[in-house]
Image: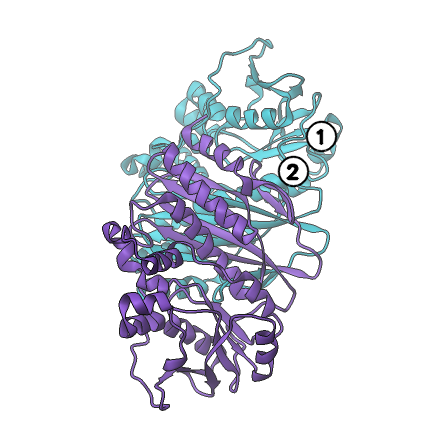
Chain colours: A cyan, B purple
Amino acid sequence: MGEFELIRHYFAAAACARVGGDVMLGIGDDCALLAIPAGEQLAISTDTLVAGVHFPDPCDPCLLGQRALAVATSDLAAMGAAPVGFTLALSMPTAEPGWLEAFARGLDAMAANCAMRLIGGDTTRGPLSITVTVFGRVPAGQALLRSGARAGDLLCVGGTLGAAAGALPLVLDERESASNSADAQVLLDRYWSPQPQLTLGQALRGKATAALDISDGLLADCGHIAAASSVQLCIEQQRVPLSDALVRWAGQDRALQCGLSGGDDYVLVFTLPAGELQGLLAAGWPIRVIGHVEAGEGVRLADAGGNAVAVGLHGYNHFNA
Amino acid sequence: MGEFELIRHYFAAAACARVGGDVMLGIGDDCALLAIPAGEQLAISTDTLVAGVHFPDPCDPCLLGQRALAVATSDLAAMGAAPVGFTLALSMPTAEPGWLEAFARGLDAMAANCAMRLIGGDTTRGPLSITVTVFGRVPAGQALLRSGARAGDLLCVGGTLGAAAGALPLVLDERESASNSADAQVLLDRYWSPQPQLTLGQALRGKATAALDISDGLLADCGHIAAASSVQLCIEQQRVPLSDALVRWAGQDRALQCGLSGGDDYVLVFTLPAGELQGLLAAGWPIRVIGHVEAGEGVRLADAGGNAVAVGLHGYNHFNA
């Protein structure tokens, strides 16, 4: 048995690889088998993280395992899907037991956090790269698409923005990250362990008219909804909720820049008929209204006086892409 | 829009990316959506091909597109699953239009050949690497597993073996592959365009007791069935069907070596109760009996006189792994 075959057995023994739920057959045969309840559809998304492009190399493999699964799983949240499982395609130059143990530990922790099961994958020799394909289920016809936003809807987000982008200087400079600052740690946690808003996504089914998870930055991702829905999204700049830790760490101006154009927060942005807001707030969902939907196209950013703010509509580019 | 965003739009416009069949939503949102008919399960498999490990770099991108999808889809055949669709995670150092056009053309051709639809994926900058995740459906409880072989079953394959391994010297040496030899072309075709035995796999549902597709080599893959089923597989060496083109090209001894230990043929190997054979042969399936299943463990190779042949039970190692 070769070293990469051994790795497959190693992952097969992880806690998150246990069969159960909708997973009828897991790692070890030619395919995994899922049973999807009648009346439900399967939601599928794939994300690749490449060393030196999407994360620094070297980095903490435990954090990398957490982040790789969280980033992919967030796409299920954006569809309002309930988590089912994932496959892992892992390429690495050499099979180092310590690295693998830590990576699998991080993966396992995020899998437990998200109720996801590892159902299969492939492990190969090659430059370090991680492709995670996630599976969720959603009642037929109830998935949250990008294309349903209507003029008059509210524009909302599911939490504060900017912290992950604010963490980038810390992520790229390990000495600085050794700082004891609690604020720096908050930013780093957001970057390395984003929390897919799975329960919020499911709560928005039948209510939100469009949704996605912010990976490219608020402005860019709002542009995706605007384009898919053939509407204009108006963002009121002063209503964009910024991470307190980020404001303290980087100052208001830089924090706003991170909140508008920084990516990697994996917070949901969605459009909501005004009549749906109170019920969701009353249920305790951390929803913040940041603007509204109008007829037109693209994204309009307005200051407190309602005047247009000029913006480059480009979002976050990964730190080396 | 960045160059890799443009690539996503390029793939979204491919013929194989059209929505239809079980695909409710394809490329362009956070997730794709599949509708699986009641009473069916979803079969899922992931395969990664890395440049310089699983294929030579440079190589013909059209052939690479064909092969990447065929290799992954073959796992659906091995489960007896009907094809539904696939995701493509493609990393490449730079976005070259000519390369992408040819790669997509090969992918599209194999997708049409296999009735597969491109439903999503990710395109990133990085060392050249291709991860394909395939989806098929199979009636609940009827998937062909590796674990059902029973003593007394026949051991069968779905076609001739060895050609893909025989092609390796040609694959690695482009001058030689310019040979006009028809036999050389047969070998190269088998390597670059293996044909997933999807219809045979589906015909074996409810009949074969165990199955897989030969990717690591006959001996190694029979070892997988033996281990999963807790039986011994006996292979009669002289019954292993070898590619005629391979025998002419490489000689009988080398051909046998390729047929036993060479990988990449993606022909099905399966175990079959003796009573099922005649019906399948009468229906025209190209099934060849190569041995039988006994109590015991591992794989036993026998010569024409029934005497054990000593073998190293290692299969094919990818040419640079």
Residue A41 percent across, percent down from the top left: 66, 49
Please name whichever residue, B100 or B25, is drawn nearer the observer in this view of the structure.
Answer: B100
What amino acid is found at the position of numbered circle 2 in the picture?
Leu
Marks 2 and 1: which is nearer the front? 2
| Residue A294 seen in render | yes
Residue A158, located in which quarter of the rendered image? top right
Vertical placement of residue B81 versus A44, above or below: below
Image quarter hosting the N terminus of chain A: bottom left
- The residue drawn where x is 51% and y is 25% is A220
- The residue drawn where x is 69% and y is 51% is A40
Label 1, secondary structure: give it.
Answer: helix
- The residue drawn where x is 52% and y is 75% is B147
Residue A280 percent across, percent down from the top left: 70, 35
First along the sequence among labels 2 and 1:
2
The residue furthest right is: A275
Residue B110 percent across, percent down from the top left: 49, 50
Label 2, secondary structure: give it.
Answer: loop
Vertical placement of residue B244 versus A195, above or below: below
Q: Is residue B179 left or right of residue A222?
A: left
Look at the numbered discs 2 and 1 and tell me whether their residues touch, using CB distance below 8 Å: no
Circle 1 crowding by C-alpha within 10 Å: few under 14, some 14–19, many from 20: some
Say which residue label 1 marks. A277
